[in-house]
Amino acid sequence: MSTLNGLKLVNTKRSNKMPPVQQRRNKLMKGIWEQMELCKAKQAGSIYAPVRLRTMKNKETGERTTLQVPKRVRAWHWTAENGKTCLSVKYGAKVIPLAKGMTAIELESEVDLLDTLATIKLAVEAGELDAQIEAVCGAVKRGFKK
């Protein structure tokens, strides 16, 4: 028991449910992480191709098999008419407005993408974009209602 004396022991229960705000933050941070990996691969001259598992049923035998298929990751950045790189932040397929009427960030070049994405990730972790995420999420929910 002398080994455990140096640890802080508490009596608590693990919550089975994460708050919706944290779930939305995690989803956005996962998308930002994918964009960062895409930028790193592009700068290294390689291709970022994550895979996902997909279960397929053989029509002839009826047997189910699990295959690894490439996941499509679309870039959130593009080159504008003035030659500068623009970056928009997306929650699913919807663009998050970063300020009133402002949906993109203008960068001097693609080299600044990783630093900008890291800054956005810190803002999401701090909860600075919670209101914008909630608004976009609410718009998606309203689309499913009749």
Image (cartoon, grey):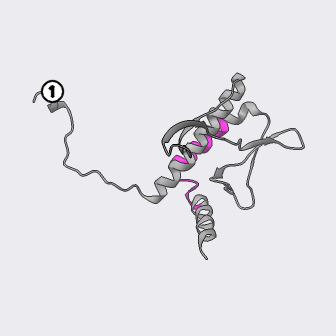
Query: What residue is drawn where x is 21% and y is 34%?
Result: 7
- Specify the principal SS of the magenta part: helix
Secondary structure of the residue carrying numbered label 1: loop
- Residue 57 lies, with reference to residue 3, above or below; the image says below
Q: Position of residue 61 (x, y in %)?
A: 51, 43
Q: Is residue 61 left or right of residue 35?
A: left
Q: Position of residue 134 (x, y in %)?
A: 57, 62
Query: What residue is drawn where x is 61% and y is 71%?
Result: 142
Q: Position of residue 129 (x, y in %)?
A: 58, 55
Q: Is residue 5 visible?
A: yes
What residue occupies the far left of the structure in this picture?
1
Magenta region = 115-131
In which image quadrant can residue 113 be found? top right
Q: Amino acid at mark 1?
A: Thr
Instruction: Compare residues 86 and 61 and report the one nearer the observer.
Output: 61
In which image quadrant can residue 72 be found? top right
Query: What residue is drawn where x is 11% and y is 27%?
Result: 2
Q: Is residue 103 left or right of residue 12?
A: right
**117 part of magenta stretch:** yes
Reading the image, the residue beneath label 1 is 3
What residue occupies the far front of the structure in this picture?
60
Q: Is residue 87 left or right of residue 9?
A: right
Instruction: Compare residues 4 and 13 and report the one nearer the observer.
Output: 13
Question: Label 1 neighbourhood size at 10 Å, few (<14), some (14-19), many (20+)?
Answer: few
